[in-house]
Image: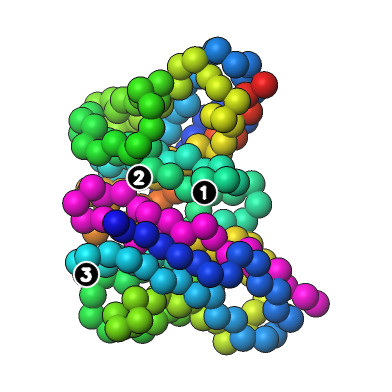
Amino acid sequence: AQSVTQPDIHITVSEGASLELRCNYSYGATPYLFWYVQSPGQGLQLLLKYFSGDTLVQGIKGFEAEFKRSQSSFNLRKPSVHWSDAAEYFCAVGSSNTGKLIFGQGTTLQVKP
Amino acid sequence: KAGVTQTPRYLIKTRGQQVTLSCSPISGHRSVSWYQQTPGQGLQFLFEYFSETQRNKGNFPGRFSGRQFSNSRSEMNVSTLELGDSALYLCASSVTMPPTDTQYFGPGTRLTVL
């Protein structure tokens, strides 16, 4: 069955520090992978996506993610976190058969001043 | 270009009532998907419509239904509301079929069932 696991429910980092959010997926074929961010009371904003090609993808707001097929991972990174990055982050895998997105449980990022 | 809009933004209903939520996709987008977000279950897929046809449906009871109009606007309906239906309902649109075509999410409708 298709699934997405985000092992870290809550992460706290200091402003200016680097960030890595983990995502592991289970999917039979070549996955369509996404990272979304959700601020309180808001919908989901797409940060980046991976379909094929270069395994290191660049997104908005200085985020990047690396697809590692051997580890079934798609971790999100940012070299220097800003206070405005505090939000909930969701990793998702898209099914090409059903069109639906399967989301992880999310990681809440807190940024310390 | 305007984003995905959802109305109303907040809704309070009582058990047993029914509710209709509305979603207007981005202009030119023909696919609309609905998701339910709760603290316990996270984000779960409800259904997806394309050109007025439901193409896919998630694992929800028949009380949850939807439709899409010729202008691509979509509505979802929940009948006989239960306390557990309290959630943020998110709508997402894409030009054609997700996930190959990127989905853009609206701000959601927060439904509270008392």
Q: Amino acid at mark 1?
A: Gly
Q: Position of residue B89 (x, y in %)?
A: 50, 37
Residue for badge 2: B93
- Residue at 23 percent across and 75 percent down: it is A52
Q: Quadrant of residue B10?
A: top right
Q: For the residue labelled by badge 3, is the local secondary structure a helix, a strand or a loop? A: loop
Q: For the residue labelled by badge 1, is the local secondary structure a helix, a strand or a loop? A: strand
Magenta span includes A103: yes
Residue A25 in view here: yes
Residue for badge 3: A30
Q: Position of residue A91 (x, y in %)?
A: 45, 64
Q: Residues within 10 Å of mark 1 (few under 14, many from 20)?
A: some
Residue for badge 1: B42
Looking at the rendering, the stretch of residues picked out in magenta corresponds to A92-113
- Residue at 57 percent across and 45 percent down: it is B40
Residue A84 in view here: no
Q: Amino acid at mark 2?
A: Ser
